[in-house]
Image (cartoon, rainbow, N blue to C red):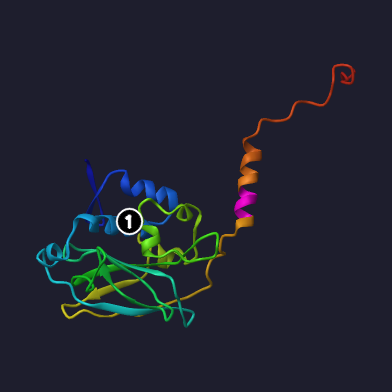
Amino acid sequence: MMWGKEFGHAYPFGFERRWITLNRCRVLSVILLVTWSGCSHSEEDDRSDGPPRVPVIGTVRLDGQPLSGAVVVFLPVDELGKVAQSDTDEDGKYALRFAGFPGGTTPGKYRVGISYLISRKGEPIGVSGRGSLPPNPEVAHAKELVAPRYSDLGRTELTAVVSPEGGTFDFDLKGPLLPAPTAESEGESTSASTERDLPPPPSTLTPESSTTPEG
């Protein structure tokens, strides 16, 4: 298998590209990478590999109100950190996990992405829904409602420096949220796309009814 690097971390070629193309969301691809890596990764392996993990918690708010159902991702910008993520609860609180294990992440500098992915049913899709096997079909049609300056790990304005003691990192996002997807709009989009793909109708003029411009 061929491997590449993004933000200093290895991933198999084709893996991330497929999911970014499908969902237009870098946060999703990182969640998938972390979740799937946990299938062959034990908590004992993690604790013996590099610096110990430390607790990282916090609260996410949007315009001063708790944002429930969001996904918080810490992406390291140096070789010391480890990718970690968490869902936010009904009070907007989160506690980072690595590869499904509680306990936070390792000390280091991080970019932080906060994603609020909403399905056509109007329900937020969390970490488990995005990294499930087989893939959740709702993810392909879901929409990111948080602005790219917070949700796109390549453009995010949010950062964190985790100390050897861990820490609390609260994030106050500025709204509004982007429009949510609806079943109606999805149907209209599908219908419009189908119409565009259809060949043009044949001419209604017959040879007898057609006219030739006078010269």
- Residue at the image point whose x is 89% and y is 21% from the top: 209
- Residue under pointer 1: 32
Considering only vertical position in the picture, is 135 above or below 107? above
**SS majority, magenta:** helix
In the rendered structure, does residue 98 fall within the stretch colored magenta?
no
Q: Please provide percent x and percent y for residue 18.
A: 37, 46
- Residue at the image point whose x is 35% and y is 52% from the top: 133
Q: Residues within 10 Å of mark 1 (few under 14, many from 20)?
A: many
- Start-end of magenta stretch: 185-189
- Residue at the image point whose x is 33% and y is 80% from the top: 58
Q: Can residue 34 be seen in this snapshot?
A: yes
**Which kind of residue does numbered mark 1 sit on?**
Leu
Q: Quadrant of residue 69?
A: bottom left
Considering only vertical position in the picture, is 56 above or below 14? below
Q: Quadrant of residue 91?
A: bottom left
Number of labelled discs? 1
Q: Please provide percent x and percent y for residue 98.
A: 24, 66
Q: Please provide percent x and percent y for residue 24.
A: 44, 53
Q: Please provide percent x and percent y for residue 9.
A: 22, 55
Q: Quadrant of the C terminus?
A: top right
- Nearer to us in this view, 78 or 54: 54
